[in-house]
Amino acid sequence: MDRRWLRVGGWALIWAVGCALWWWSGEPTATASSNNWTIPPVRPQLTNPRFECADGYTAGVNPTGEETLIPNGWTAVYALGSPRLLSVRLSILHTCGTSDEGRWIERAFGGGYDSLTVRSQDLERLPEPGKPFDVLLYHQVPATIGGAYSLSAWMSSKCGNDNPVDCPDGNYIAKAIGIDPYGGTDHNSPAIVWVENRGNLGWKNLYTSVTALADTITVFARMTSPFQFHGNLGFMDEFSLVRAPLSAMKALPGTVEGGREIMLNWEGQQSADVVEIGGTYELLFDVQARPLPSGEWRDLLIGATDPMSMTFQAPCVDSSYEFRVRARAEQPPAPPEGIAPNHRYPGVWSKPQVVTFTAPVVAPITPTLPITVTQGMTPSLYLPMAGSNKRC
C-alpha cells in the first residue's frame, strides 16, 4: 500500500478520535452572547417548590421526638430548639386535596391549597410557651457553572396573638432564603447569599440571586425565632427558582482625560423562564457607582427601562469610580393584573468596570523676554484657562 495513504488515514483517525473525545467530554450546551453570558440550557427544577400536600410530604421527627412532615425533595436541619414542621392543610384538616374546602388555610396570595408551617415548641403551653428555634430546609439542584440563577419565595411569621397584636417591642422572627453557589449543605458557609426579613404578620416576598460556581447549587429556607414568646410560628410557601435575567455594562474607557463626564451604556436579556411564566413582567435595570478605593455603592438609576444609557459626572478629577448594572424582572402595579403569586426575580450584578478621571494637561508657559512696552501703556499678560475641574 502507498505510504501516503497510510499517512492520510492516520491523520483522519486522529481527527475522528479527537472530535469524539471533545463531544463526549463537553459540558451541556449553553448559549453565550457577546458579553459571554452563560445561559443554562434548561430551567432549574425544585421538587415540591409550592409545599403542596398533593405533591408529597415525608414523615419524620424533630429533636424532641414530635412528628413532623417535610416536603419531598427537601432536607430539614434543626440548628436550635425543636420546632415542628408540618403541612398546614394536613395538620388542620387531616386530609389533602384541591377542593375549596379549607381555603382559609394560611398560604401565600395566589398560592395553591397548602403551605409549610413552622411551630415553636410548646406553642401555647405554659410555663414557657413558644420556645426559641432556628430551623432550615435545603434542596440541591443541578446547575450550569457560570449560569445566573434567581430565587423568589414567600414567608410569613406571627409573634404572639395578632388580635390584638401583643408581640413585645424588639421581638421578631427572622425569615430568610439563600443560595450556595458551590452546592454545599453547611448553612454556616460564608459562600451562601442570604436575604432576610424580620417583619411580623403578613406575607413577605424574599428574593436573591447567584452565579453558579459548581454543577450544583443549594437553595436554603430558614426561620429563626431568637425570643421566647407564646404563639411564635411561621409559614413558608411558593419557592420559585429560575434562570436569572441578564445584564452587562458596555465597555468603558479606563481613563477620561481632562474631564469629569462619561456616558454609561448597558444591555440586557429577559429570562426565558420568566417569559414562560407569563404575567406582566418587565425587564428593569439598576445602575450603581462607587468611588475608589473604599467607597460604598450608590444608586444612579433604579428600575430603568429605556433608554439604556445615562450620563455620569464625577464630582472631581484625579479620582476613580467603579460602575455596575443589574437586571431584574418584576410586574408593575395593577392594572393590568399580573400573575400571582407576584414573584420578583433579581439578576446578578455585572462585573464592575473602573474609570479614572484625570485633570487636563496644561502646557507650561514660557514668555518671550524682554517684553517691549510702549511708553504710557500698561503691559498685560494673557494666560490660557486651566479649566474648572476641581480635584478631590
Image (spheres, helix red, strand yellow):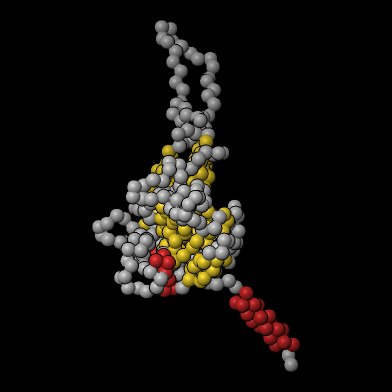
| Residue 24 vertical placement versus 320 (above, below) | below
Q: Among all residues in the image, which is located at the extreme front?
A: 127
Judge by depth and name the residue closer to the eye, 86 or 77: 86
How many numbered discs, if any?
0
Q: Kindly identify the residue that appears in the image at 47 percent across and 29 percent down.
A: 390
Question: What is the x, y in percent for residue 262?
Answer: 44, 42
| Residue 168 vertical placement versus 99 (above, below) | above
- Viewed as shown, does residue 89 lie left or right of 140? left
Judge by depth and name the residue closer to the eye, 316 or 99: 99
Judge by depth and name the residue closer to the eye, 127 or 383: 127
| Residue 164 vertical placement versus 138 (above, below) | above
Judge by depth and name the residue closer to the eye, 353 or 164: 164
**Quadrant of image for the N terminus:** bottom right
- Viewed as shown, does residue 300 lie left or right of 280? right
Q: Kindly identify the residue that appears in the image at 42 percent across and 50 percent down.
A: 159
Residue 321 seen:
yes
| Residue 285 vertical placement versus 369 (above, below) | below
Question: What is the x, y in percent for residue 187?
Answer: 58, 57
Q: Among all residues in the image, which is located at the extreme top?
A: 376
Q: Kindly identify the residue that appears in the image at 35 percent across and 63 percent down.
A: 105
Residue 240 seen:
no
Q: Residue 76 sits in which quadrant?
A: bottom right
Q: Kindly identify the residue that appears in the image at 41 percent across and 65 percent down.
A: 88
Question: What is the x, y in percent for residue 288?
Answer: 45, 45
Question: What is the x, y in percent for residue 143?
Answer: 54, 67
